[in-house]
Image (tube, rainbow, N blue to C red):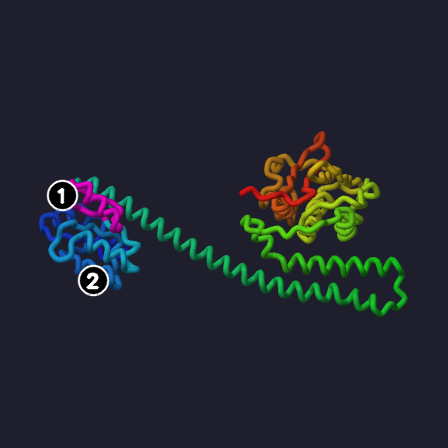
Amino acid sequence: MNTDPALDEHRYTILVVDDDPQSVAILTEILAEIYRVRVVTTGDDALAVVRSGSPPDLITLDLVMPGIDGLETCRRIKAHPQGAVIPILFLTASTSLRDEFAGFECGAVDYIQKPVSPALVQARVAVHLELSRARIELEERNQLLLERARLEAEVGRLTRHDLNNGLAVVVGVPEALLMRDNGLTPAHKKSLHLIVKAGKKMAQILNRTEDFLKLESGQFRLRPNEVHLQPLFEEVIASQRAASDAKALSWSDLDSLDPTLTVVGDELLLYSLLANLTKNAIEASPPKHTLHLRMVRRSRDVEIILRNHGAIPRPIRGRFFEKYSTYGKLNGTGLGNYTAALITHAHGGTIEAKVIEERDTEIHLTLPLEKKKRVS
């Protein structure tokens, strides 16, 4: 038997609970080469060890003992916080299925009949120690994830606070300039109004971060209103004018959009949806090309078709709307299209990406003309 104290410190501890000296001797011989073995002969002594500062990693427990029997000992161990996580293996000469079921009901993880097989005992003990270790690691990971989620929520709250402060300046300065009206040209006024409008829209989106979390978990409840699509698109395109102008991109068919087309939905979320799609189209387009936008009224919905030059890269074609799906973008997160899909589905719509002749990409988006009834 290895008695090296340094090695012994790193071995699992098995508590053998049995009043039969022969059984104790057999189990000690089977287990002591691999584990540290402690022996007690009563249920009360077993409880004292479990409640101590050095509880065992696994317990082998005899079913029939003087004083409190194995079943009651098991119940009391499992009722203690330290004992709740310790795997208990019953060892008994009984062949009664009733006894076996009773053992599992009170919290045991396995049942070994006497006379025991050394190989079987070693195998069962090893398996349950490994399962216990894996469960503990999983619980620790879950605690870390919960703590990380808490910290991320706190960082998100602080970030939203700081961004709102910044947006207050973005909105406040142009508004102050507009109020003074000190020789501003109509073009300057129009630009300042766009900045104010975009800043307020960003603040609204920022303050509705929780809605996006609910969208992802499927807990979001839509608050639908009638939304006019043409002015919403004009607002989105105007907010991204700098990015499209930087690439000398142009838009076609905007004048032909039907100003009477409306859908039922959340205007702020629809703005975010359209902004994500147009931003992605602008980023994917080569310079000096044309972006195409069409809206088609159908019997129950409106189909929006957004087309840009440049095919979706092959590696992400099958997962274009999946979370973190991105390719070839230095700072791409793959969240824009994913968020667009979440918002679309929350509105009862559909979204699809098509590659046209390996040259262009078309996004086909449908949004309902009226609120869809929920299926119970």
Q: Quadrant of residue 166?
A: bottom right
Return the x and y of residue 228 as percentages of the image width and height: 75, 48
Q: Is residue 98 magenta?
A: yes
Q: Earlier in the sequence, mark 1 or mark 2?
A: 2
Give 123 or 9, whichever is nearer the viewer: 123
- Identify which residue, 261 or 117, lies in the foreground: 261
Q: Amino acid at mark 2?
A: Ala
Mark 2 burial class by Cα count in 10 Å: few <14, some 14-19, many 20+: few
Vertical placement of 222 versus 170: above or below?
Answer: above
Whether residue 329 is visible to the viewer of this picture, yes or no, is: yes
Q: Residue at x 25, y 43 (%)?
A: 124
User: Circle 1: is it few (<14), some (14-19), or many (20+) Cα within 10 Å?
Assistant: few
From mark 1 to mark 2, how far is it between C-alphas? 26 Å
Q: Where residue 115 appears, x then y in whole percent?
A: 13, 41
Residue at coordinates 26% horizontally, 64% vertically from top-left?
53
Q: Position of residue 152 (x, y in %)?
A: 53, 59
Can the viewer see residue 3 in this picture? no
Q: Which mark is residue 48?
A: 2
Identify which amino acid the numbered label 1 is placed on. Ala
Residue at left 90%, top 66%?
183
Q: Nearer the viewer, mark 1 or mark 2?
A: 1
| Label disc, if present, on residue 371 of the rendered structure | none
Local SS, label 1: loop
Q: Which segment is the magenta one?
A: 89-114
**277 relative to 252 in the view: left or right:** left
Q: Does residue 332 appear left or right of residue 50 in this picture?
A: right
In the image, residue 266 lies in the stretch drawn in magenta: no
Residue 93, labelled with which disc?
1
